[in-house]
Image (cartoon, rainbow, N blue to C red):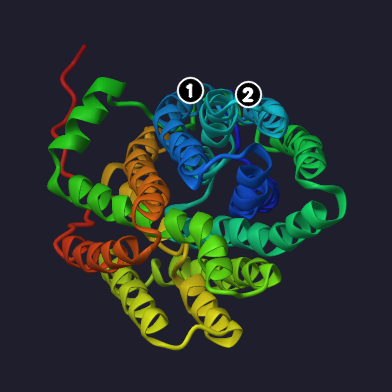
Amino acid sequence: MQHKPLSLTQVLLCGAAIVTLSMGIRHGFGLWLQPITQAQGWGRQEFGFAMAIQNLSWGFVGIFAGMVADKFGAFRVIALGAVIYSIGLLGMAWATDPWVFALFTGVIIGTAQAGTTYAVIYGVIGRNVPAERRSWAMGVAAAAGSFGQFLMVPVEGLLISQAGWQTALVILAAAALLIVPLAWGLREPALSAPGQTQRDQTIAQALKEAFKYPSFQLLMAGYFVCGFQVVFIGVHMPSYLKDHGLAPQVASYALALIGLFNVFGTYIAGSLGQKMPKKNILAFIYAARSMAIVVFLLAPLTPTSVYIFSAVMGLFWLSTVPPTNAAVAQIFGVAHLSMLSGFIFLSHQIGSFMGVWLGGYLYDKTGSYNIVWLLAIALGVFAALVNLPVRESPIARKAPLPA
């Protein structure tokens, strides 16, 4: 029996709502840095370490979440991820030991994010959206994650100020469970059914092919930089601004502006990916990020300069996601898309680990974020250069041998 793919509207509505919740909760974690460290008597390094572990767990587990979603469909992976997310947020609220905090905030929430964010959602999009609309659809899903940041970060800041940081986390734990019914809308027919994605490669063959292909390695290198920049800024900028005497609400508004403008940035990047080389889009984004950071650091630090910087960075914040994943789908096809996207994303998360951990470590050692800002600038230039040689044309494969 031949099964029809899910409708475009259903995939986008459910996928976008899931990413809005999952990424919206995650983007506000920087607002908890000072309340938690002050309440527990920790340094910023302890909080930064837990967030770094979260990014590594997210990236590492994402590979296996992608494998399962590619083979059995995304519904089970997303629903289980939502339950784990809720457990992790409760543990984050009640942990009093740095290692227990790192377990819940780092390992458990990171595992949950692996099953409820882009790699799994993009696998559903790749399997159910025609190639000529795939990059655009990925841009819509990424824009939803950005809207989640714009919507959720001010709400999280309000919850912290009105209910306290612990109660705010308990409320978010309940909100994370809303992902379960949304995942029901992404139930796919059996992927082995006629008319579904054909699997001419085993997992091992797909991985061997990808890792031997230079363009895959270059995309991974660029994504490492993406993770370093956005997670360092997202987690440490609220404290950086407070250190320089700006009011706490400036940071909340800044993170919300990043989310708002990234709605447009990711949608534009996804749409442009249908019309022009994705490698050129990526090179421009990374170069523009470095330029924005340079101007931000040279200009006088005021609420206005912070909001302008946030708006500009917002345009380029997660706009790397649609062209990167669409390039992977274009080169290798969609049969193993969630898994290959998971490996690319692991590189992103290793960069995230370095950005968030170095931010806390070097701040505690030097009393300043200056070295990490300079690293973010240099890495942006590097990422712009390594994306230019990427070859986006579908990989040439030999015909499979008879069984």
394 relative to 400, above or below = below
Of the numbered discs 1 and 2, the one sitting upstream in the chain is: 1
202 vs 377, nearest the viewer:
377
Q: Is residue 19 visible?
A: no
Mark 1: amino acid? Val
Q: Secondary structure at mark 1?
A: helix
* Residue bearing the label numbered 2: 76
240 relative to 220, above or below = below
User: Could you tell me how many numbered marks the image carries?
Assistant: 2
Residue 198: x, y in percent? 38, 29
What residue appears at the point 49 percent right and 74 percent down from the top-left corner?
315
Drawn side of residue 97 relative to residue 384, left or right: right
What residue appears at the point 68 percent right and 67 percent down from the top-left corner?
248
135 vs 129, nearest the viewer:
135
Residue 159: x, y in percent? 81, 53
Cα gap from disc 1 to disc 2, whole angstroms: 9 Å
What residue appears at the point 58 percent right and 53 percent down from the top-left corner?
30
Picture quarter containing residue 22? top right
Answer few, some or many: residues within 10 Å of disc 2's Cα (few below 14, many 20 plus, some between 14 and 19).
some
* Residue bearing the label numbered 1: 68
Residue 154: x, y in percent? 73, 63
